[in-house]
Amino acid sequence: MGRADERAEALRNHFDGKVALVTGAASGIGRALAAELIDRGATVVVSDVDQPGVLAVAEALERVTGGTDAVPSRAIAAVLDVTDADDVAELVARTARDHGGIDFVFNNAGIGIGGPVSDLSLAHWQRVLDVNLWGVINGVHAAYPIMIAQGHGHIVNTASLSGLLPSPLLVPYSTTKHAVVGLSVGLRMEAAEHGVKVTAVCPGVIETPLLDKRNPDDLPATDSPDIRAMLTALVGQPYPAASLAADVLDGVARNRALIVTPGHARRAWAAYRVSPQLLVTQGADRMRKALRGAQSRHA
Ligand SMILES: NC(=O)c1ccc[n+]([C@@H]2O[C@H](COP(=O)([O-])OP(=O)(O)OC[C@H]3O[C@@H](n4cnc5c(N)ncnc54)[C@H](O)[C@@H]3O)[C@@H](O)[C@H]2O)c1
């Protein structure tokens, strides 16, 4: 076996026999992370607010692990709304109790809220902050003391490229993702002295149902943009969720502070660091063009 193969195998083995909890795992990135963790030998608590969705995903993953009476399943379904701090604390504590510890918590659940800020109500802001920011805080608050007591553990928070770049028409979403990056990297520096690791994941455009979702129906109606068309025009073609999950687990195994992937995300972030002013000026122009294109396609 060559050096590169040995390194690839060491990255995969990092998760073998470990215990992980993933939030927002009934769909998209969370589902792909759970599948990749199982594939790399971890036991995974697969959680989501969507009960039928999470049961179906856990059942599909359980078939892969071949859980039987003799061999316990490595995919355990849990219904969890990440905005409920008590429920998050209870599930994290139960997971650690049932499995003799908890090695990874992936705070991944998230929603998109789109539209010009002038159209959005405070209810839009509150909803996205509740899920995308408080959901992560609740996960951190529950897992961190347990990991400190264990002397090890890794918290992985799904932020976004929108947590590194300005994102017009996704401003409340981008606000939460910038906060998740700040929370994660600052906490990482504190956590190191307890043996606990923290990583923020900043995906670019990923092929998941999120790209086709509109703002939640129970919030006041707005003219939300076509997120898929806009992000594809601005950033690049959607990247498969399974490829993202493999990149993320490799980055977690390497204990990266930030995982920015795929290449289109790294290039956009690099352009912003080289010239924030240029990206803001050109970005506004390209956003207007992308929106006109998206609107004419949907006329
Ligand atoms: N798809 C992308 O292009 C992209 C890019 C960057 C970051 N992200 C982030 O990745 C994460 C996952 O998004 P996705 O693209 O897989 O979307 P998705 O819509 O496919 O999946 C999100 C999951 O989160 C769950 N969820 C929503 N609210 C919840 C709550 N209160 N409690 C528990 N679960 C809840 C949903 O039921 C769903 O199963 C989000 O944080 C999102 O912001 C996505």
Image (spheres, grey):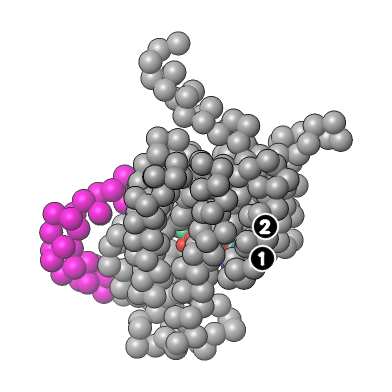
Whether disc 2's CB lies below 8 Å from ligand 1 is answered: no
Q: Percent position (x, y) of residue 290?
A: 30, 69
Instruction: Check the image and report above or below for 241 versus 137.
Output: above
The image quadrant where one finds the C terminus is bottom left
> Would you say residue 278 sits in the magenta stretch?
yes
> Would you say residue 215 sits in the magenta stretch?
no
Residue beneath the point at 27% across and 67% down: 166
Between 278 and 137, the one lying in front of the other is 137
Between 266 and 81, the one lying in front of the other is 81
Crowdedness near tag 2: few (<14), some (14–19) or many (≥20) residues, C-alpha within 10 Å: many
Residue beneath the point at 13% across and 59% down: 275
Disc 2 to disc 1: CB gap under 8 Å = yes
Specify the amino acid type for callout 1.
Asp
Q: Percent position (x, y) of residue 123?
A: 49, 85
Q: From this viewpoint, which residue is outermost toward the right?
A: 69
Crowdedness near tag 1: few (<14), some (14–19) or many (≥20) residues, C-alpha within 10 Å: some
Describe the element under mark 2 as helix, strand or loop.
helix
Residue, disc 2: 91
For the record, the magenta segment spans: 263-288
Q: Quadrant of residue 84?
A: bottom right
